[in-house]
Structures are given as structure tokens and as C-alpha cells.
Amino acid sequence: MIVRIMGEGQWKLADSHFTELNKLDDELLDEMESGDESGFRRTLGSLLDAVRRLGTPLPDDALEPSELILPAPDATLDEVRQMLSDDGLIPG
């Protein structure tokens, strides 16, 4: 799967990492719903770090269709709320 982090680029990840990313997405959604700003910041950082750690960055000139689009590391709670659908950042 191809994952884009807004403002950074794209990473290619094996589908086997979906479970780990989905767990972090669920935590992020819970923190957003409860308004836990510090938890949101921590979990968003963990989610983005997991993509960077588990994935292989695509060249800057590559324009692959992204299956997942994640917010930039400095995105606010309100900005991410606007990005979310009922399924969270990672479709289940």
C-alpha cells in the first residue's frame, strides 16, 4: 500500500503492517473524540513514525496514487477532525 504524509511525501508499506497502523488510528480517533490534545499529539506522532519506520520512501518525483493520506505532523486536532470520515484515517 502507498501512504502519503501530507507535506512530506509517500511511503510504500507491506499490507502486513495494516494491523499496527489501524491500532494507532483507532487510538487517535478515541483521543480526538474525547478532546485529548496531548494524547492526540503523541499518537499522531507514533502513527507517522510507524509509517516512516515500516515503509520505504518513494522518490520525490514519484506520483503514485495514495491509498492512505495522513495529516502533517503539525496538523491541529481540528484539521484532522475535518479529514476524518466515519472510518478514521485508515479505512477499516
Image (cartoon, rainbow, N blue to C red):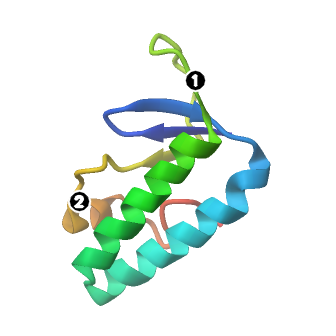
Q: Residue at x 45, y 51 (%)?
A: 48
Q: Quadrant of the N terminus?
A: top right
Which of the numbered marks, if any, corresponds to residue 64? 1
Quadrant in the picture for the C terminus: bottom right
Q: Is residue 65 above or below residue 76?
A: above
Confirm whether residue 82 shows in the render.
yes
Q: Which residue corresponds to the image point at 43% horizontal and 72% vertical from the top-left?
A: 28
Question: Which residue is identified by label 2?
Answer: 79
Return the x and y of residue 58 as percentages of the image width and height: 56, 22
Answer left or right for 30 relative to 21: left
At label 1, the amino acid type is: Glu
The tally of labels here is 2
Asked if one can make out residue 87 in the rendered structure from this viewpoint, the answer is: no
Residue 54: percent from the left, percent from the top? 63, 44
The CA span between labels 2 and 1 is: 24 Å
Which residue ends up furthest to the front in the rendered image? 53
- Horizontal and vertical percent for residue 57? 55, 27
Q: Please tell me whether residue 57 is drawn above or below residue 19 in the rendered image.
A: above
Q: Say which residue appears at 29% left-offset and 66% top-offset.
A: 41
